[in-house]
Image: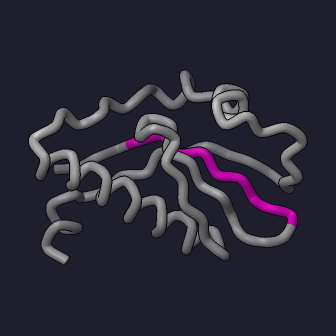
């Protein structure tokens, strides 16, 4: 099973990236490089989806990327004056079955 979710990335001034998955209750992770941050996002998504499946819960649906906004996330988390270099959003796709085998 593939899980695909929009993910928000913030490049931090201090270095590294902060990563948020709004469709999964704004769960977050980070990485010191973009590659590491993307891998951590994959692991986060796969872990949450796998946990939900194992508990017999419904898998949260994926929102269209154009309906996900940085402003909603920042307001939801009460973030003001975040000191970042750049931000972007993209989809992350994860093969949950392969993750489960690990």
Q: Residue at x 21, y 46 (%)?
A: 52
82 over 36 or under it: above or below: above
Q: Is residue 54 left or right of residue 83?
A: left
In the picture, residue 85 is in which quadrant?
bottom right
In the foreground, 31 or 91: 31
Horizontal and vertical percent position of residue 49: 26, 49
Q: Residue at x 12, y 52 (%)?
A: 54
Q: Is residue 45 left or right of residue 50?
A: right
Please tell me how many numbered marks the rendered image carries.
0
**What segment carries the magenta color?**
5-13
Q: Is residue 50 left or right of residue 21?
A: left
From the image, give the main secondary structure of the stretch colored magenta: strand
97 over 31 or under it: above or below: above
Q: Residue at x 30, y 59 (%)?
A: 47
In the picture, residue 31 is in which quadrant?
bottom right
Q: Residue at x 23, y 67 (%)?
A: 99
Horizontal and vertical percent position of residue 8: 60, 45
Please, which colouring scheme is shown? one colour
Horizontal and vertical percent position of residue 87: 74, 48
Q: Is residue 45 left or right of residue 33?
A: left
- Is 35 in the magenta? no
């Amino acid at each position: 099973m593939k899980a695909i979710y929009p993910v928000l990335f913030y490049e931090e001034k201090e270095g590294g990236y902060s990563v948020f998955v709004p469709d999964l209750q704004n769960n977050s992770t980070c990485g010191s490089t973009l590659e590491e941050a993307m891998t951590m996002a994959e692991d986060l998504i796969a872990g949450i989806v796998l946990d939900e499946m194992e508990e017999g819960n419904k898998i949260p649906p994926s929102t269209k990327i154009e309906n996900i906004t940085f402003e909603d996330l920042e307001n939801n988390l009460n973030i003001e004056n975040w000191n970042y270099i750049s931000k972007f959003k993209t989809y992350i796709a994860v093969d949950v079955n392969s993750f489960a085998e690990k």
